[in-house]
Image (cartoon, rainbow, N blue to C red):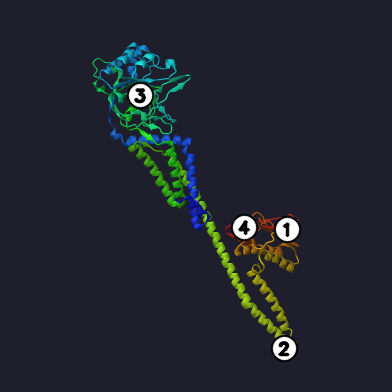
Amino acid sequence: MLPLAEVRNLLNGGSSQEKLVAQRLFWGMLAGCIVAIVLAESSWLKMMELSSLEWRYKVASRVGAAGTSFCRDIAVVAFDDTSQFDLGIARFSDVKAQDILARVVDSAEKGQPALVALDLDLRGASSPALVSSFKQYGNIVVALFGSLDGGQALPSGELLGHSAAYGYSELVKEDNGMVCRLPINYQAKTQKIGNKEFMPVKSLTEAVIDMFRRFQGVGPASEFLPLQSDQPLYINFKSPTYSVISMRDLLQPGYDASQLKNKIVLIGSTLTPRVGDPQNFRTPIKDNVPAVMIQGDALACLLNNQVVCSLPRWLNHLLLVLMGVGFGVLFSLASTGKRLFYYLVASVAVVLLAQVAFQLFNISLLMAAPLAVLTAVFIISTFIYLDTDLRMRNFELAVARKSMQVRAEEERRRIAEDLHDETLPTLSTVARMADKLSKEIPENTVPYMMREKLDAAVSEMRRVINDLHPSVIETMGFVPALENLLTMLERDTGIECTFNDKVSQSEFGLSDFAKLQLYRIVQEAVNNIEKHSNATKAEVSIEKNDQQLSISVIDNGRGFDPGTKRKQSYGLVNIRQRAQLIGAHVDWATPSKFSSGTELNIQLPLASPVI
């Protein structure tokens, strides 16, 4: 990539091809940067990002379907629709239901699990049997439903006071209703609710992981997993299978609970979904998944160190900007075929990289935003390429026209010199011969008539030579040459001519080519006055305002409308083309000082590089 100083130098100087490359580099970089900044925080792209994340989950699930494994650290105890009615419970927020739950806990504890997590609604109730179980085992983690200041919205103080840990069990739903983010919301600072301050409360997932690590001495530390809005952590749904035990079976006499030894036992509800059950959620893999199963997947993900991490927001933005700038430069420099090829390859690479990073390295890279940036940069860079290419072609055409005009002027000059050096001397020699004949044969009038014709031919020849190459510019200067055009017009036609010189200088720093083109434009306008205007007055004015040279040619003739005049009119086309060659602007109007006629205005920026 070129340094900015070098790009600036190329923009201000260098060849036309270098300027074109520098312009494409500059505009491509700028377009890519702006597009990336604008799209980085787009709300609709965030929704598309969630859809692309769901797609990556499904692809990873299909690819890794054969690798589904059994989870040895987690067992799930749940009741379904049938067992609910058999046990006479729908929720555990009353004493009768909690008495049954105490029997379930006692039965599970016979298997000596590492801990028991109750992902159940225990709000408000306090069964002595359940409190006794909490006291006896000391390894029970309770799920909270409600808020810290909700009174009856939380389990009773006795249950919370004798539990080993507790945490909120609400799952984190994304904007599209999908659950894929780890429910970790613990922050190491107190929370102020109203006038009271509460100690920070973890999520149920984090509380269980902390307890399991404390009891077993192994497992990941949860302190490195704070939930950050700009760097979410996702559940890696590897679809493990668990030891799933019906709560009804666990209450049967003689049930062997040894399969629960040293495991995390999750006791939750509704493995069989009920209509309208609020604990059934949608994951990227399945619909209507019980909350307890998602908690199990989250715990298995943490235990196996398979959390899907995302990049910080600032890093995502930086990578988007770098990608936008890089591809902005690449697309703006590449031809149409290569640009499309690069776009397709880059798009496929973004998709493959996102999937490989997700599936093999447990990293969630942005996919929708880079694709949107690529598409936007591709479209804008195409316009940049076409615009600069069109301007380059116009520039080359202008250079070609200028070169042709220069060669034409050189050819006119050569012809004028040949006429002046060869034809005029020959005509003068013939004229002298005619004079000699008239003296030798005075009675014969033919030599005298020949002399008159020869004088007329010499005069016409001198006029043609002056038209071919106006040496008056070189001998008298630019402004006097323009004034001379009016002098000859007045002499030849009797039209009253006025020359207004408002600059009191002659050259203006113009090149010989620019002065010649301006002279030709004014000459063409004066010829039109002579041939077509039927004017009685003509006027040429020249002035300089704010680094701009202005020349106007006015007559009081019959005038014309340039819009209705034939576009192929040679005189008007000639004037426009000569003006374009030197970067001047011409327009025609009705003069304000006459009731009729034509006013030709020529505006030439003196700072123009083409001058």
Which mark is drawn over residue 606? 4
Q: State the image coordinates of residue 369 (x, y, percent, origin top left).
A: 44, 39
For the residues marked 4 and 3, what is the alpha-carbon distance in whole angstroms?
A: 78 Å
Mark 4: few, some, or many residues within 10 Å (few <14, many ≥20)? some
Give the quadrant of the C terminus.
Answer: bottom right
Amino acid type at circle 1 is: Gly
Q: State yes or no: discs 2 and 4 in contact (Cβ < 8 Å).
A: no
For the residues marked 1 and 3, what is the alpha-carbon distance in whole angstroms?
A: 95 Å
Q: State the image coordinates of residue 522 (x, y, percent, origin top left).
A: 67, 62
Task: Tell me which residue sits at (58%, 70%) in the image.
Answer: 411
For the residues marked 3 and 2, what is the alpha-carbon distance in whole angstroms?
A: 137 Å
Above or below, comparing residue 96 to residue 18 in the picture? above
In this figure, which residue is indicated by the disc labeled 3? Answer: 207
Q: Which element carries disc 4, helix, strand or loop?
A: loop
In this figure, which residue is indicated by the disc labeled 1? Answer: 597
Asked which quadrant contains residue 147, the reply is top left
Q: Which element carries disc 2, helix, strand or loop?
A: helix
Task: Tell me which residue sits at (37%, 32%) in the image.
Answer: 234
